[in-house]
Image: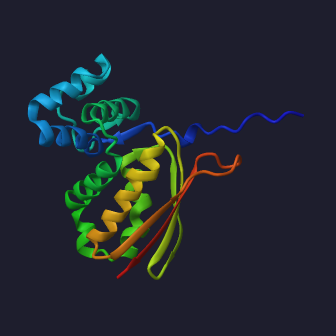
Amino acid sequence: MVRPPPDFSSLKITHERGPVTRQVRTAALAWGGDAAWADVLAAVSPACRARFARPIGFYEWVESELALELHAAWAAHRGVDDMSQRGEDGARELLGGVQQWILRLASPAFLIENVPKLYGFYYRGGRMNLAYLGSGKAGFEFNAMGYPESWFRDGLTAWLRVALALTGAREVRVHHVPPNTPETPHLHRYEIAWRA
């Protein structure tokens, strides 16, 4: 009997909230003003241009396919893949804005415990779980697909590093372990260490 191939469709990240996509516009405006933003919009498909021609609301869901196209156009315009910078900026924007209450209460451990909930608020698709939490160390298992490898490797790693630093953690180290088995082809692991 032949087994059907596994269904990974629930692991595909399909949407992201407004603040995540607004980072590209903010970065383009800071880098080159309205002209840079216009250049980025001119480089994307008509569907993507129409989606981002107006400001995106905080709670609004944006299709990941269009958000990724916008990011790729911005990276091409700059001539660099700035996924680490986007991760750092994202941590500052999300945790310094509406989610700032977390930082007022947060120890590094409290933030770590809530990262899967934050992920679920800002993204649709994929599964993030806290694998372990100890004194000055933690691990996540993130089963997801649909984004470039640099997002998993550089962007999310930078987000975790800056988010923990915002709680007062020092010497934060985040190590990304990419998928490495045929049984779990979309399972990313993150090993985190810090000093309080």
Q: Residue at x 52, y 41 (%)?
A: 145
- The quadrant in which residue 88 appears is bottom left
Q: Say which quadrant the N terminus sits in.
A: top right
Query: Compared with residue 186, is residue 47 higher up or lower down, i.e. above or below?
Result: above
User: Percent x, y for residue 162?
Assistant: 31, 63
Q: For residue 159, what is the image quadrant?
A: bottom left
Image location (x, y in percent) of residue 185: 63, 46
Q: Nearer the viewer, residue 159 or 175?
A: 175
Above or below, 154 relative to 101: above
Q: Is residue 10 above or below residue 43?
A: below
Within the image, what quadrant is residue 94 found in? bottom left
Point out residue 165 in the picture as x, y percentages from the top left corner.
Answer: 30, 70
| Residue at position x 56%, y 41% in the image | 10
Instruction: Determine the residue positioned at 9% across, 35% down.
Output: 33
In the visual, does 6 lie left or right of 107? right
Task: Report the residue at 34% width, 33% height from top.
Answer: 72
Q: How does the figure colour the protein chain or chains? A: rainbow
At which x and y percent is residue 137?
Answer: 47, 76
